[in-house]
Amino acid sequence: MNLRRFTSALLLAILAGAVSVSTALADSPLVGKVKKIDGTEVDLADYKGKVVVIVNVASQCGATPQYAGLQKLYDTYKDQGFVVLGFPANEFGSQEPGSDAEISKFCSSKYNVTFDMFSKVKVKGDGQSPLYKTLTTQAKPNGDVKWNFEKFIIGKDGAISGRFATAVKPDDQAFVKAIEAELKK
């Protein structure tokens, strides 16, 4: 093969790869800006290239102690490119009635939360946040979030790699193995 043909073939391969990569990223839930619990704005694209767990949280829920397990996971894997993103939501039994300041104080004083927390969002129904609209339509299985502390795993490639119900605690072996598998990629 001559150099011109080789260069053309290589360029076509690169372009084909770029198209599929950019298409995958366009479908990623890590798109758009969200407000952190302290009021600063963050671009979700800043988390691409990391393994991300997105979880809807509530301070007055039977599952609230999962904050401790999420913090432990974060502490264990954060140096390997792992993050937890907590999104307070009040759709389930009005179990997150507080303001952002109250939620932040609760999380830091009761559970020593240091992973990223965000302003309260709607995870289902009218006014559903764009992030949760993408998560609930693209995840397998798709459909509405059923309760507080439902967890979505996003791989380094920006694609949803897992969805775990409230009953699956942060130390559940299937959940931990799914995170570890994504970190190895």
Image (cartoon, rainbow, N blue to C red):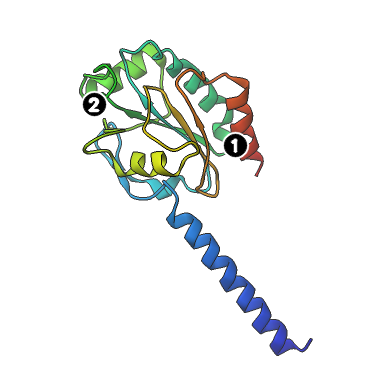
Which mark is on residue 166? none
Who is closer to the viewer here, 65 or 133? 133
Badge 1 marks a residue whose secondary structure is helix
Instruction: Count the numbered circles shown.
Output: 2
What residue is rendered at 21% in x and 37% in y? 126
In the image, is residue 185 above or below residue 11?
Answer: above
Badge 2 marks a residue whose secondary structure is helix
Quarter in which the N terminus is drawn = bottom right
Q: Quadrant of residue 184?
A: top right
Who is closer to the viewer here, 167 or 54? 167
In the image, is residue 47 above or below residue 143?
Answer: below
Q: Earlier in the sequence, mark 1 or mark 2?
A: 1
Image position, residue 116 (x, y; %): 39, 32
> How dense is the environment of label 1, judged by Cα within 10 Å: few (below 14), some, or many (20 and up)?
few
What residue is rendered at 27% in x and 40% in y? 40
Q: For the residues marked 1 and 2, what is the alpha-carbon distance in whole angstroms?
A: 29 Å
Q: Quadrant of residue 81?
A: top right
Image position, residue 173 (x, y; %): 63, 21
Q: What amino acid is at disc 2?
A: Asp
Q: What amino acid is at disc 1?
A: Gln
Image position, residue 22 (x, y; %): 49, 62
What residue is rendered at 71% in x and 87% in y? 5
Left or right, 168 with respect to 30, comes to right
Q: Label 2, on which residue?
A: 100
Quarter in which the C terminus is drawn = top right
Left or right, 76 with respect to 96, comes to right
Who is closer to the viewer here, 93 or 78? 93
Image position, residue 69 (x, y; %): 50, 18
What residue is rendered at 64% in x and 29% in y? 177
In the image, is residue 177 above or below residue 61?
Answer: below
> How dense is the environment of label 2, judged by Cα within 10 Å: few (below 14), some, or many (20 and up)?
some
Q: Label 1, on which residue?
A: 80
